[in-house]
Image (cartoon, coloured by chain):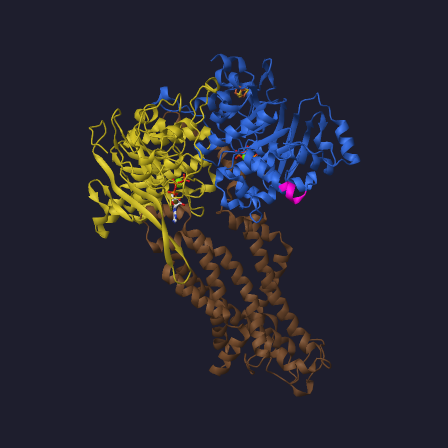
Chain colours: A yellow, B brown, C blue
Amino acid sequence: MTDTPSKFGEVVLETKDLRKHYPLTQGIVFKKQVGAVRAVDGVNIQLRRGETLGVVGESGCGKSTLARLLVGLEQPTDGSIMLKGKDLSKVSSRDMRSVRRNIQMVMQDPYTSLNPRMTVGDIIGEPFDIHPEVVPKKGRIARVRELIDLVGLNADHINRYPHQFSGGQRQRIGIARALALNPEIIVADEPVSALDVSIQAQVVNLLERLQDEFGLAYIFIAHDLSVVRHIADRVAVMYLGKVVETGNEDEIYEHTTHPYSQALLSAVPVPDPALRGLRDQIILEGDVPSPANPPSGCRFRTRCWKAQEICAQEEPPLMVRPGSEHPSACHFAEERQVVGAVS
Amino acid sequence: MSDLIPSATSDEPALQSSSSEGAGATGGTASLWSDARKQLIRNPIFVISSLYILVVSSMALFPGLWTDQDPRNCIISQSRKPPQDGHPFGFNILGCDYYSHAIYGAQPSLSIAIGATVGIVLIGGTLGLLAGFYGGWVDTIISRVVDIFLSLPFLLGALVFLTVVKVQNILTITMVLVILGWTTIARVMRGAVLSAKNLDYVLAARSLGAGNLRIMLRHILPNAIAPVTVLATIALGSFVAAEATLTFLGVGLQPPEESWGIMITDHQVYFLEAPWLLIFPTTLLIGTVLSFILMGDALRDALDPKMR
Amino acid sequence: MTTEAPVKSPSTARFLSQLDMTAPPLEVRNLHVEFHTTSGEAHAVNGMNFVLSQGETRAILGESGSGKSVTAQAIMGILDSPPAKITHGEILYRGVDLLKLSDEDRRRVRANHIAMIFQDALSALNPVFTVGFQLGELFRKHRGMSRQASKAKAIELLDMVKIPAAKQRVNDFPHQFSGGMRQRVMIAMALALEPEILIADEPTTALDVTVQAQVMGLLSELQREHNMSLILITHDMGVVADVADSISVMYAGRVVEDAPVADIYARPAHPYTKALLESIPRVDLKGQELAVIKGLPPVLTNIPPGCAFHPRCRYAKDNCKVPPEPPHYDVDVNRVAACHYWREVIES
Ligand SMILES: Nc1ncnc2c1ncn2[C@@H]1O[C@H](COP(=O)(O)OP(=O)(O)OP(=O)(O)O)[C@@H](O)[C@H]1O
Ligand SMILES: Nc1ncnc2c1ncn2[C@@H]1O[C@H](COP(=O)(O)OP(=O)(O)OP(=O)(O)O)[C@@H](O)[C@H]1O
Ligand code: SF4
Ligand SMILES: [Mg+2]
Ligand SMILES: [Mg+2]
């Protein structure tokens, strides 16, 4: 990825050739590794202060695995994560806790991501139990109330249980918990996918407001391309564990050059009946190959209409190609207008 | 932002009732126990069995409440006299009051059952928790040990153990029941922990930096309480029965100890001439075993959201 | 596809003679469904009305819990009752009220005339039988075909839904298919007996957009070929715009707006429809706040009096807050809206 100057602050998060392979084993007593699921397979991303990076891609392409790696729920098989210039694999375990505080997560499912046996106050206050140095014991309740207020809930509900709230309200509780430790980066794994359309907008607005207020940087994972377009400054398109194209919102949505991004965008239905039949829809044949056994060369070649011999032999690197200004991992990268793809 | 805050506060009225509606869709677990309580109170089987257990427990704890006779005060001439005024259960072969005998007999039976249950919950629970939580080789070792113990036939194991140690008192019998019984709890615990381990809220706590101990105690263990409670209740019943069985086979409690098992064993040959000597202790025993098992069953239904 | 005549019994003949082939394939009138719950009666469907014309694709659009699936299940006669109870209404198939039919006739309608596709294809297929067996079963049971012939039919169907190498794949089990393929198998199964009406309950919600495009494309193609009438249940405004002819927008178990697809998107006449459309992110409004619908969806045990939408509505006036609920005002020839102030809404 190029280091073009940007209106956002310094780079706060960067991954270098990040990989996560889950071993596939056989046998119960004597386990034998018979292969690996390459869930994340060489991902390079950069995130600047105050910026939102959207990550899109089909189910199983490794978005959640990437998120879990970033927040430390999984250890990378290879590659590195740099948080504010520090390589996480080199940070001593003593410093790790305070470094990790800077990056927090919002989960997809508001119904399962809150412990049903804890009150809202306990849930939002738990980060302070784990990191007692952040807020002095006396100030905790006040801080929790402040957080509840910040995400637009009623602070008097501090003693209620999660099941007494609706999905959208629970998602706000999850956001308050993520904000508790004053992180600079929030990784949101499909934060609005489980919500109804009418509630989604409330949560998206809240995330944007918090970003403006605190200069947060977001990794925003979603499969709804129109929500990503709305919230993201830059977008990374993933396919089978790799980023195949990245660029700012306009580059990806209006000048996409990778055939997979083109197909993905063209498949999104447009909420405008006037455009029916006018769109240039690319219908992909076949299914996503297994990440345990990805195709040689370009991973997309088995479903790509442009594929030539070279695609099976050489893996196209993610780089800026002639005739375009943003990186794309296709030997035949070429702009194609996907009419009104995502409105 | 301006419309965020009012929108949230205007939720007020809907919020109150959303708990009742949400219950169906989201299965709020915080209300699991309170819902269960409501359901149990309305379940006659549960109410009757818990009343029965209450009665039996008070016999064990405060025998003086139930009888003022001393079971050891025996008059041989009264031997095998049938139930009569003041002596509702009649007299045993030695001419002791059988009713007070039965009251005092509750204590050893229940002590063993409760002791053994506490033992299996502690041992089985801990090992199951460790196996499920850490996985890997810890799990492999614990699971294999569980398999070995499960392959031991219960009665044979108990007979061999009690014959070898030669001392047959409350402590040794409790021990043998724990040794042979912890595996069921361990298995259930391991399963509950495994399914809780990857719950989103556990991952959320982990991503906040929570340590293992906190995750186990705060987030995982509460998920296992329901299945373990059910199993422990049923285990109480089976241990009462097991104590009687071992005594009957001659490796359990020995006289002068008094227990329902001993009462049954000692009077088995008098069934035809003095049937009450067998009927009273057996009825008490069966009632206790059955009550515990029915309670466990009712608990299982009440705690299973799918049954609603 | 060939049509082998179903084995006709006298009762079938009687049933067929009642049908009025000039009547619309399906009409739902004032349908009410309640669920008995511990916290009271949940009014899941409250006066559902719509007409499905021949060859039409009608979308039923609404948020989670608005009663879409319950309506579909009521039409199919597969509601779980108790707790569900149909308290009012008629469901007319070619003029015959399905709710008055015997169980046997109901089953016959379900098998031969109305079919349904479910959201979760994996759980709708039996994991222990091959896909071919499950498809063939339909022909053996309802058409009295032999094993051989039914297998040939199964292959033909898999071909029809564009499963590659259908000859080999018939012997596979459901778990050996991907999500999109399973949904196509479900479509094949639903179409096997050539129903007149197909109800698709969120057929693509569980699928990726790329696969969704495949499946929706296939579905509309087959619908055209077989001249079926299609009820498409969804909450995705995009999918609706792509394939539907008309839309019934549901809120709290009731149709709040019913109109041809172009009209709804161009000039919504109900505040709820309007708000839904506004909450879709738009390119030209990037950087601005998204329009939100304030408040929460209603609690079905305690639906607000008058217009159920009034607590969240920015057009609401005092008369919206008291019964009766707003009637279906005629907005246009084919178009109704259940809002007292539809004129204001449509003009703003
Ligand atoms: N713990 C694990 N063990 C083995 N394989 C895993 C594990 N977690 C994920 N995978 C595999 O890694 C791949 C990527 O999964 P991941 O959950 O990251 O996808 P995703 O992009 O988030 O998909 P979705 O959109 O469905 O959430 C999948 O093939 C998945 O099966
Ligand atoms: N078996 C049931 N018992 C109790 N309530 C039920 C049952 N089935 C459905 N309901 C209730 O009926 C209401 C309508 O449900 P329905 O499934 O029709 O919603 P839907 O519009 O299909 O939503 P979704 O988009 O989530 O599928 C819901 O509030 C639901 O809780
Ligand atoms: S009837 Fe009243 S409350 Fe209902 S939608 Fe119309 S204006 Fe809003
Ligand atoms: Mg995911
Ligand atoms: Mg539904």
Could you say where residue A195 lies in the image, as x and y percent from the top left?
45, 34
Residue B197 shown in magenta: no
Which residue: 58% across, 28% down? Answer: C231
Vertical comparison of B49 with C29: above or below:
below
Q: Nearer the viewer, residue B180 or C169?
A: C169
Q: Nearer the viewer, residue C139 or B167?
A: C139
Residue C249 place in picture, x, y as percent? 55, 24
Locate the N terminus of chain C by quadrant.
top right
The rendered magenta stretch, by its main secondary structure, is classed as: helix
Q: Is residue A205 visible?
A: no
Name the outermost residue toward the front.
Answer: A309
Residue C39: percent from left, percent from top:
58, 40
Q: Position of residue C193 (x, y in %)?
A: 64, 34
C82 displayed left or right of A240: right
C49 displayed left or right of B275: left
Q: Image quarter for residue B296?
A: bottom right
Q: How many marks?
A: 0
Q: Please report the residue visible at 55 percent of the width from the left and 35 percent of the height from the top.
A: C159
- Which portion, as a residue range, is magenta? C146-150
- Residues B235 and B184: in front is B184
